[in-house]
Image: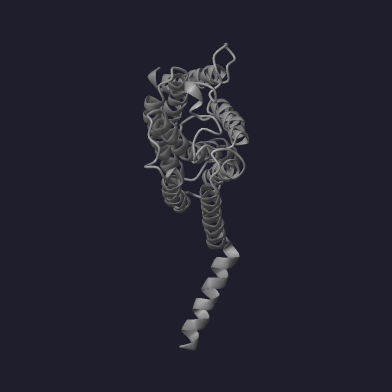
Amino acid sequence: MSAPARPLARRLAVTASFLLAMAGTAVGVGAFGGDPIAEAAGGLLAADATHLAPAAPAFMIWSVIYAGLGAYTIWQWWDRRDARGIAPGAVLSLLLNAAWILTIQAGLVGLSVVVIALLVAVLADLFRRLASAPPGSLVERIVADGTFGLYLGWASVATCANIAAAHKGAGFSGFGVPSVLAVTVLAVVAVIGIALVRAGRRPIAAPLAMIWGLSWIAVGRGTDEPHAPLVALTAAGVALVIGVAALATALRTRSTADPRSVARRDELADHGRSAR
């Protein structure tokens, strides 16, 4: 009797966590009368609040992520074994998502940095687990690998904006050179992006989400206040670097996995040995 209860408990936990995250999202968009995230906490997370704030359209990616999380929640009811062990991390990520929204609504921007850092750590562990074993089906690749890859990539960029918002709320002005500090942070994002590309299995979703977020930081700092051309150019450059790294890795992985490439490589090796 205990064996069937475990997958049922896992399925119910994921579903309940998803529903809580959706309730938190409703609070975050002001559905229950509160301020939307962009207006909460004194507007510290608005598109024109800091040098690392993405332009407003960047947040449309949440619709894709939430749709993916919903698809994963439904799919995992048919996933008997959770072979890659991602359900506990999925539950924790959903709960942290709701907790982050509530801390922002409460005006606790400093605490929200801790929450989003924990979220990124959980998502990074999920990414590691997903990369360590292949998915069992195309559907799993989309709803698990794709969803949590997007989630991690976006959360990595959003963390930078969150930290910048907390600094501004604390009265920190970036030593009088906020653009230089923002560029330094973006350089760290470049390193993180390349690391994710190198660590992933067929890395697509995580770098795409990072490119999306960085591109909208570039747009925001190029067209809106605070106007910062150096930050805009750096964000665009980092997005390009991550994109090139992802493309190169994807092509290399495809070439390695292509049976014709393997046969051709073996043929060339045999030819070299006979020539000697």
Q: Residue at left 62%, top 33%?
A: 60
Residue ranking furthest to the front = 176
Furthest residue toward top? 33
In this orientation, which residue lies closer to the viewer: 97 or 158? 158
Q: Position of residue 22 (x, y in %)?
A: 55, 20
Q: How many marks are shown on the rendered structure?
A: 0
- Residue 246's place in the image compared with 115, above or below, is below
Residue 173 appearing in the image: yes
Residue at the image position 50 percent from the left and 41 percent from the top: 153
- Residue 132 in the image, given as x and y percentages of width and height: 42, 46
Residue 276, above or below 53:
below
Quarter of the figure with the N terminus: top left
Quadrant of res 260 = bottom right
Nearer-the-camera pick, 222 or 82: 222
Colour mode? Answer: one colour
Quarter containing the C terminus = bottom left
Residue lying at the far bottom in this picture: please name it: 276
Residue 31 in picture, x, y percent from top left: 59, 14
In this rendering, the answer to whether 47 lies above or below 7 is below
User: Residue 237, image x and y in percent?
Assistant: 54, 54
Residue 240, image quadrant: bottom right
Identify the residue shown where x is 38% and y is 36%: 121
Residue 11 is at least partly visible in this image: no
In the rendered view, does 172 fall on the left or right side of 52? left
